[in-house]
Amino acid sequence: MAELQPVEAALTTLLDDVAPLPTELVSCSHAAGRVLSDAVPARLDVPPFDSSAMDGYALHHDDAGRSLPITQRITAGTIVQPLSPKSCARIFTGGELPPGADCVVMQERVEEKDNLAAIPADIPAGDNIRRRGRDVRADASLLDAGVRLDAAALGHLAGQGITEVVVRRRPRVALLSTGDEIVEPGQPLAPGQIYNSNRPMLKELLERFGGEVVLVASVPDNPEGTRDTLSRAAREVDVVISTGGVSVGEEDHVRAALESIGRLDLWRLAIRPGKPLALGRLPGEGGRTVRFIGLPGNPVSCFVGAWLFLRPLMGALLGCPALAKLPTLSARADFATNTGPRRHYMRVALEFGEQGVVAKAFRDQNSGVLSSCVGADALAVIPEQSRIAPGDIVDCLWLRVD
């Protein structure tokens, strides 16, 4: 029987020779969640001019401590005139600082009467001013290659007047389910059948990781049907994912089918949950190599495997370092556990308090108990041959997408 492989070996095998996908031009209005293929340089200074940080009065700091005539009223968007010596301008937040002024006094500190503003003394130069280019300088790097476009990044692009960006094409994914006992939600259940919980769960996770599920299919429980389904899927996608059928049972045909038409790179991991997992390659159209991941059928094993393997693969195909590696944080365990020769990934909720982060384990960690994944913030990583007591520090993989 093949030796159980560690997660690190599996990831190395999975990501070997994976290259980022081709690029495409998309509108920024449809670019949320997409990954930049190239760095985007800034076109403009942001802010584009010196402006007031608040409502008040603009003046030269040498004129502070006097009553100054108000010679202009400047709102955001107003075309300004040079400030006359020994005068001030009524200015509002975002208004352009007029030439000759070098500070702004907030309106609460000024008394205004008969078009004169009594300015307090000792106002420093630069007070309450947003300087041109404080945020971004023209020709500097605005966003780096590999950045995933979230709300702030899209706002950054809009602030430059950019309407289109070049991004990586989304990885096309086939999501296959094995087992004649698996029934889609909405259909009646016959004796011995169960609903397919893995398909909608994986579809949502894959889309969160930047992929696009373009093919869903059920795999027949026979060798010929399994081979045909894998071959057809590989012609249409970049990644083929199956659930179930990778164990050692007489009706588990996926491993044999993969070996007959493609290549099996790795099988069986030293982890809990998720020991039966297959990694390999299938021939695609035009000589392309299509990655194959055979996840276990148990829903928790499927969930854990998606975070450990599908997310890094999507990150590599998208050229996105933030996706390629899960963020890790340390927490105090509120549980006790022992491990044998397999690394355990426990579903935990995180509590953030004055004493630090506490990892609270869900009571039932069985691989068939999907409720342990509902509300899980992280996977607590318990190394092989370990004994954990309450209060011990454990590393946690934070289940979030940057």
Image: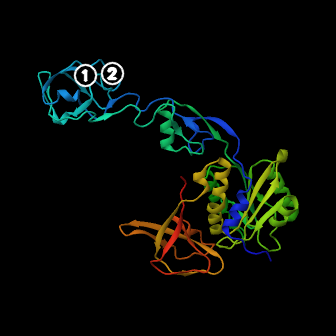
Residue labelled with disc 1? 73
Of 371 and 28, the residue lying toward us: 28
Looking at the image, which residue is at 63% across and 56% down? 311
Judged from the image, the secondary structure of the residue bearing numbered disc 1 is strand
Determine the secondary structure under disc 2: loop
For residue 191, say whether it is visible: no
The mark that comes first in sequence, 1 or 2, is: 1
Three-letter residue code for mark 1: Arg
Is residue 23 found left or right of 284 in the rendered image? left
Q: In this view, does 184 lie above or below 275?
A: above
| Above or below for 166 versus 100 | below
Residue 168 placement (x, y as % from top left): 65, 42
Q: Where does residue 341 sit, x and y in percent of width and height?
A: 66, 79
- Whole-percent x, y for residue 284 in the image: 82, 49
Q: Where is residue 78 in the image (x, y as percent from the top left)?
A: 33, 21
Looking at the image, is 209 positioned above or below residue 6? Answer: above
Other residues around mark 1 within 10 Å, as few (<14) / some (14–19) / many (≥20): some
Q: Which mark is residue 329?
A: none
Q: Nearer the viewer, residue 229 or 123?
A: 123
Badges 1 and 2: C-beta atoms under 8 Å apart?
A: yes
- Render colour scheme: rainbow
At label 2, which amino acid type do we have? Thr
Nearer-the-camera pick, 132 or 323: 132
**Residue 155 shown left or right of residue 312 in the figure:** left
The residue positioned 58% from the left and 80% from the top of the image is 386
Image position of 199 with respect to 371: above or below: above
Task: Report, in whole angstroms, how far the alpha carbon at label 1 lies from the one at label 2.
Answer: 9 Å
List the residue tagged with mark 2: 78
